[in-house]
Amino acid sequence: VQLQASGGGLVQAGGSLRLSCAASGRTFSSYAMGWFRQAPGKVREFVAAISRRGGSTSYADSTKGRFTISRDNAKITVYLQMTSLKPEDTAVYYCAADRDTGWGLKIRTDGYDYWGQGTQVTVSS
């Protein structure tokens, strides 16, 4: 599966953005999906994940209550709605697909098989 992330940009602290990740292929609904982010000089970190049909979600403590992950399998797209953004949310955001969903939602980068190219989110103070 190929993934294309979009929707990043520059926003003031307290603002909102919605990221999208469009997938190719007919097997999108068989993948769990995740969002990760990587700030300059830092390791890539988990943001959120969603199960194949969207019934289960998982969030990093730093994003819980502010970010919402969702998916539309008919549109083969996963979303990340981000609200109450903070300067520390500034990073390149990546979407990823996990084809081995038998072990639940994963928060490690090595649990995902396919990655999008990333979209930059910059939050100004």
Image (tube, rainbow, N blue to C red):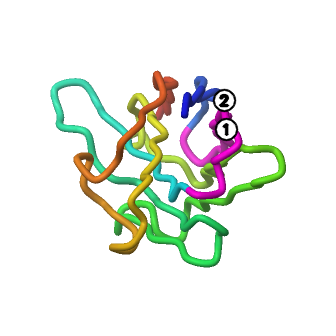
Q: Which label number is shown at residue 7?
A: 2
Q: Secondary structure at mark 1?
A: strand
Q: Residues within 10 Å of mark 1 (few under 14, many from 20)?
A: many
Q: Residue at x 59, y 48 (%)?
A: 14
Q: Which label number is shown at residue 20?
A: 1
Q: Which label number is shown at residue 42?
A: none
Q: Residue at x 61, y 31 (%)?
A: 11
Q: Secondary structure at mark 2?
A: loop
Chain part drawn in magenta: 13-30
Residue, far right: 74
Can you say whether 105 is above or below 73 in the image? below
101 and 63: which is toward the camera: 101
CB within 8 Å, label 1 to label 2: yes
Tell me: 77 left or right of 98.
right
Tell me: 78 left or right of 120.
right
Can you say whether 110 is above or below 66 in the image? above
**Residue 60: where, in percent of width, then height?**
36, 64
State which quarter of the image contains the N terminus. top right
Can you say whether 57 is above or below 29 in the image? below
Q: Residue at x 67, y 35 (%)?
A: 25
Q: Residue at x 49, y 40 (%)?
A: 95
